[in-house]
Image (cartoon, rainbow, N blue to C red):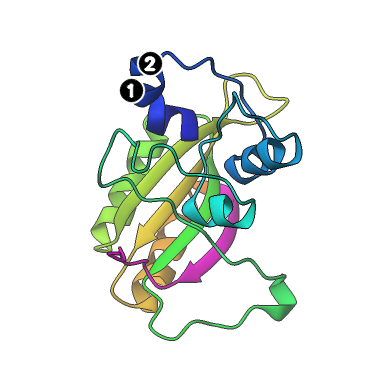
């Protein structure tokens, strides 16, 4: 994802691209190997942590780009969030024509907004897909109504979390 966010900068400056696991590990690699002719795309915090000089700040292509970080807990440790207004979940549909449209219609009928919908192939299946969705709602009752209304059209529903929507922090 970082590569897509910074591709214009990389192409304009003719950098040779080497992919790593993540941006912070890239910064750590530069630090550990004392690389003088290499750079990492990483956060300001990673630069500080690994004592790296920032040679080009704010190189992202989209100026309003935001990265979302989540804090995960095991189910038995999770605490219900008061005034939660967003949920992340996964579901599968039966494999029949128009079924996803029916699911989306039922979600919309409850006044719930889909801020993300991503399809992914189901491993081991032929042309069957599961869907990752982020849903925004005004109250928990709306979410419960959605889950109830799509129950007959979906299977393997997994709730990853119910939480407060993030806010963009200027600074």
Q: Dot 2, crowdedness within 10 Å: few (<14), some or many (≥20)?
A: few
Q: Which residue is mark 2?
A: 11
Q: Position of residue 23 (x, y in %)?
A: 58, 41
Q: Residues within 10 Å of mark 1 (few under 14, many from 20)?
A: some
Residue 158 sits inside the magenta stretch? yes
User: In the rendered view, does 92 fall on the left or right side of 143?
Assistant: right
Whether residue 1 can be seen here: no
Task: Choose between 152 and 82: the one closer to the eye.
Answer: 82
- In x, y percent, where is residue 158? 60, 56
Q: Which residue does the image show at 61% across and 21% down from the upper left?
A: 18
Is mark 2 in CB contact (under 8 Å) with mark 1?
Answer: yes
Q: Is residue 24 magenta?
A: no
Q: Quadrant of residue 87?
A: bottom left
Q: Which residue is mark 1?
A: 8
Looking at the image, is 160 positioned above or below residue 138? above
Kindly tell me whether residue 64 is visible in this rendering.
yes
Q: Assign a secondary structure to mark 1.
A: helix
Q: Residue at x 64, y 51 (%)?
A: 50
Q: Which residues are magenta?
A: 155-171
- 25 horizontally vs 15: left or right: right
Q: Is residue 39 above or below residue 150?
A: above
């Amino acid at each position: 994802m970082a590569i897509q966010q910074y591709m214009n900068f990389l192409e304009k400056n003719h950098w040779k691209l080497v992919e790593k696991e993540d941006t912070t590990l890239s910064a750590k690699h530069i630090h550990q190997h004392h690389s003088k002719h290499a750079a990492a795309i990483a956060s300001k915090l990673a630069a500080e942590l690994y004592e790296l000089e920032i040679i080009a700040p704010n190189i992202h292509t989209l100026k309003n780009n935001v990265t979302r970080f989540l804090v995960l807990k095991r189910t038995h440790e999770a605490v219900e969030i008061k005034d939660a207004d967003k949920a992340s979940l996964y579901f599968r549909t039966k494999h029949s024509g128009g079924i996803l449209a029916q699911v989306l219609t039922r979600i919309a009928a409850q006044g719930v907004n889909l801020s993300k919908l991503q399809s992914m192939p189901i491993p081991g299946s032929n042309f069957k897909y599961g869907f990752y969705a982020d849903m925004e709602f005004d109250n928990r009752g709306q979410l419960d109504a959605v889950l109830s209304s799509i129950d007959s059209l979906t299977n393997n529903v997994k709730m990853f979390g119910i939480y407060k929507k993030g806010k963009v922090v200027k600074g």
